[in-house]
């Protein structure tokens, strides 16, 4: 009977831990012109089980960004092992970028950003899962 309690407790604890971790990443990060520090740096784990036109991504966004005022120039760049991809879905559409393995350039998306909520997915073309570093900056390359 004691063993049964442990078998019940372990999966329950795992579900709670994964739910808390997933919800922590989906809390929107507010971004407006002149934000500090610049760059904002966010971390997480790339990849997921969902196959997309931008590699394998998780079902939930890796990060959620809330642009509160129009930003004339904003650059999202992701660095990770493996074959990282960057997918951003927001008011202006859905955009995908792949890392350039030949020149070692990170996957990045930049330009004018309208106010709204942006779902950011850090994926991987090879179904891998790796630690990533996502930087958000107003400074050009």
Image (cartoon, helix red, strand yellow):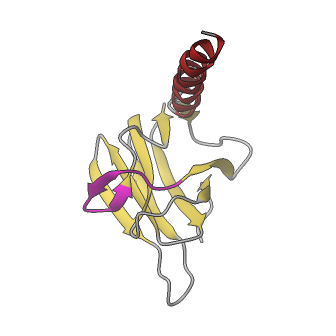
Tell which of 49 and 93 is nearer to you: 49
- Name the residue at the bottom extreme: 102
Tell which of 12 and 41 is nearer to you: 12
Residue under the image location 57 percent in, 27 percent down:
14
| 47 within the magenta span | yes
Tell which of 103 and 10 is nearer to you: 10
Where residue 13 sits in the image (x, y, percent)?
60, 21
**What range is drawn magenta here?**
46-56
Residue under the image location 31 percent in, 57 percent down:
95
Where residue 99 sits in the image (x, y, percent)?
47, 74
Q: How many marks?
A: 0
Where residue 90 sits in the image (x, y, percent)?
33, 42
Can residue 48 be seen here? The reply is yes
Quadrant in which the C terminus appears? bottom right
Q: Quadrant of residue 1?
A: top right
Q: Is residue 97 above or below residue 8?
A: below
| 43 within the magenta span | no
């Amino acid at each position: 009977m004691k063993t049964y309690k442990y078998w019940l407790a372990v999966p329950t604890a795992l579900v709670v831990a994964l739910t808390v971790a997933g919800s922590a990443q989906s809390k929107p990060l507010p971004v407006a012109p002149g934000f500090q520090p610049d760059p904002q740096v966010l971390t997480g784990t790339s990849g997921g089980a969902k196959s997309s036109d931008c590699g394998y991504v998780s079902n939930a966004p890796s990060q959620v960004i809330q642009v509160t005022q129009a930003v004339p120039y904003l650059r999202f760049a992701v660095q990770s092992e493996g074959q990282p991809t960057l997918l951003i879905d927001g008011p202006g559409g859905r955009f995908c970028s792949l890392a350039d393995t030949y020149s070692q350039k990170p996957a990045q998306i930049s330009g004018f950003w309208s106010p709204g909520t942006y779902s950011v997915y850090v994926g991987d073309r090879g179904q891998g899962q790796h630690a990533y570093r996502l930087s958000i900056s107003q400074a050009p390359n």
